[in-house]
Image: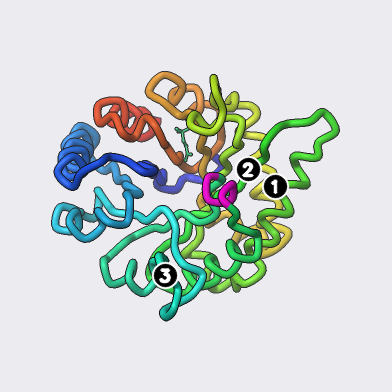
Amino acid sequence: METKRKPLLIGNWKMNPRTQSEAKELFLAVKKGLRRTPGAAVVCAVPSVFLAPLRAHASPTCMLGAQDVSSEKLGAHTGDISILMLEALGTSHAIIGHSERRASGETDEAVAKKLSLVVRSNVTAVLCVGERERDSSGRYLSFVENQIRSALKGVPPGKLARLAIAYEPIWAISTATPNARAATPEDAHEMILFVRKILTDLFGRAAALRVPILYGGSVDQKNIAGLVAGGGSDGYLVGGASLRAQDFSTIIRTVYAR
Ligand code: PGA
């Protein structure tokens, strides 16, 4: 890690679990696991239908996040969830531009619009970027750079406190790629530095240093120690392993032990 800021650890539950009672059970188990690591905080990005019922169980250290948000504020947008609704529910973070949403048609323009709305709210945006594959000529770097520059078009420097970026290479996401493996700490670190450089170009070094940059993709209880030691990120976006309260608890402990 380049600077000493509190780690940002987010569990992305994706479209799990099936029922409200299972969601409550998992959330409470995560909360219980947190007790083993005093001072730790996590965000569970849950399916939006669980935000209201879990709200009573959320706390400043066990927060609730959303997995997406509408690019519009209110009105005739069937099926969408507004940032105003997320704010009203006390949602702390909203994932934007996850590769699974992009794969179902979300464009860079839509991502930029969502981001511009969220950074102006009380919810922190977690912008996801990441390449499908790595090539030896380094095209993946310009791909990620374009994703970031295009997404941040509507984000003024004064709103950066509401921004985090998650580098999630699609080839490393367990649910996207069969036999996916996490990026090596070296590969993750290279990209974290690269993302920081893009932010520095856009907003200046001091501002860029304040934006948490996370790594995501097959993070689990086994590889987390290596990522913490050498990955250089300010936190992690954890999919599959965040559904296993015990493994997530191990991840939390390892992240905070550094
Ligand atoms: P994974 O998912 O940890 O299961 O690879 C990460 C994500 O898609 O956010």
Q: Amino acid at mark 2?
A: Gly
Give the distance between the C-alpha atoms of the residues marked 3 and 1, in whole angstroms: 31 Å
Give the distance between the C-alpha atoms of the residues marked 1 and 2, in whole angstroms: 6 Å
Q: Look at the image and say whether residue 93 sits in the magenta stretch.
A: no
Mark 3 nearby-residue class (10 Å; few <14, some 14–19, many ≥20) = few
The answer to whether the residue bearing label 2 lies less than 8 angstroms from the nearest atom of ligand 1 is no
Check the image and name the residue furthest to the right.
137
In the picture, the disc for residue 235 is none
Q: Circle 1 — which element?
A: helix
Quadrant, the C terminus: top left
> Which of these two is toward me, 2 or 56?
56
In the picture, the disc for residue 78 is 3
Residue 90 left/right relative to 214: left
> Which of these two is toward me, 162 or 50?
50
Residue located 41% across and 36% down the image? 239
Q: Circle 3 — which element?
A: loop
The answer to whether the residue bearing label 3 lies less than 8 angstroms from the nearest atom of ligand 1 is no
CB within 8 Å, label 3 to label 2: no
In the picture, the disc for residue 144 is 1
CB within 8 Å, label 1 to label 2: yes
Residue 16 left/right relative to 130: left
From the viewer's perspective, is residue 174 above or below residue 235?
Answer: above
Q: In terms of sequence position, does the residue under pointer 3 or pointer 2 come before the other?
A: 3
> Picture quarter containing residue 205?
bottom right
> Picture quarter containing residue 38?
top left
Q: Look at the image and say whether residue 103 sits in the magenta stretch.
A: yes
Q: In terms of sequence position, does the residue under pointer 3 or pointer 1 come before the other?
A: 3
Instruction: Between label 3 and label 2, give the one nearer the viewer.
Output: 3
Q: In terms of sequence position, does the residue under pointer 1 or pointer 2 come before the other?
A: 2
Q: Amino acid at mark 3?
A: Thr
The span picked out in magenta is 100-104
